[in-house]
Amino acid sequence: MKIVVPVKRVVDYNIKPRVKADGSGVETAGVKMSMNPFDEIAVEEAIRLKEKGVATEVVVVSIGVQQAQDTLRTAMAMGADRAILVLSEESPEPLAVAKVLKAIVAKEEPGLVILGKQAIDDDMNATGQMLAGLLGWGQGTFAGKVDVADGSVRVSREIDGGTEEVSLTLPAIITADLRLNEPRYASLPNIMKARKKPLETLNAADLGVDMTRRLTVVSVAEPPQRQAGVKVGSVSELVEKLRNEAKVI
Ligand code: AMP
């Protein structure tokens, strides 16, 4: 069974994002970019399934600018076998990504597509669900545990206040949550080896996908500055402030 893992290049999670001066989005010029953390978890899960003998090949896919090939090389250094880069604008919207992935699925015929549950740049949390809808496949979103056996996959989903177990017939879509696993670091020899692994570059138009945006970002703003706190002298002063200033009791 082949596994496809879509990986997105996003602003590194350690970097504090800055809003562009014209409020049109988040600044990415000159900013450290990395693989979306949930996609690292998805890659790790696919590699573990290959190590267990459940999967035979792990193919990573990124839709974005040329530099996204660095993200794909990172995934191959972790252990993915080959990569596909579909050239487009930076950060295409989820419906366009899902349509490209549908075309990749038609070409690659995987048994599983494992995505991240969301990309940390625009927090859409939509691509996996849209892809499942476009393909008519079952979906196990927010996966905390995955077991593949006999043509089906059992997914333990992270839901409010607990977990939910679902069983999906393969082929299926999974989106990875934080507790699924702890991704490995790529070793130096594997980083070197990844340079020689195959990376195919395509255009969205080659796949017959219309990437026209349907969403317009009206504005992006920094959160309001937090005000400095005050020290209270006594419990009664605290109660008085909570009652009369904050009006929360
Ligand atoms: P989102 O719906 O944008 O929050 O993204 C959910 C998941 O879809 C991500 O964790 C990735 O696995 C995948 N994804 C989203 N955008 C892209 C992209 N441009 N290239 C590859 N994968 C993507």
Image (tube, helix red, strand yellow):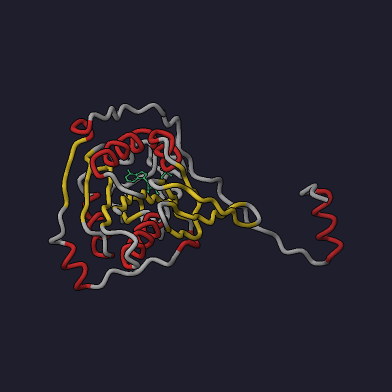
Work out whether residue 183 or residue 48 is closer to the camera in this orientation and state it. Answer: 48
Q: Is residue 109 left or right of residue 199?
A: right
Work out whether residue 15 or residue 58 is closer to the camera in this orientation and state it. Answer: 58
Q: Position of residue 107 (x, y in %)?
A: 23, 40
Q: Is residue 112 left or right of residue 166?
A: left
Report the residue at 39% width, 38% height from top: 131
The relative height of residue 44 versus residue 164 in the rendered view (above or below) is below
Residue 149 placement: quadrant: bottom left
| Observer able to see residue 124 | no
Quadrant the N terminus occupies: bottom left
Work out whether residue 8 or residue 160 is closer to the camera in this orientation and state it. Answer: 160
Report the residue at 47% width, 48% height from top: 168
The relative height of residue 26 versus residue 205 in the rendered view (above or below) is below
Q: Position of residue 195 (x, y in %)?
A: 15, 61
Report the residue at 38% width, 56% height from top: 42
Q: Position of residue 20 (x, y in %)?
A: 37, 41
| Observer able to see residue 155 | yes
Specify the quarter for ligand 1: top left
Kindly give the residue lying farthest to the right in the view shown.
236
Residue 48 placement: quadrant: bottom left
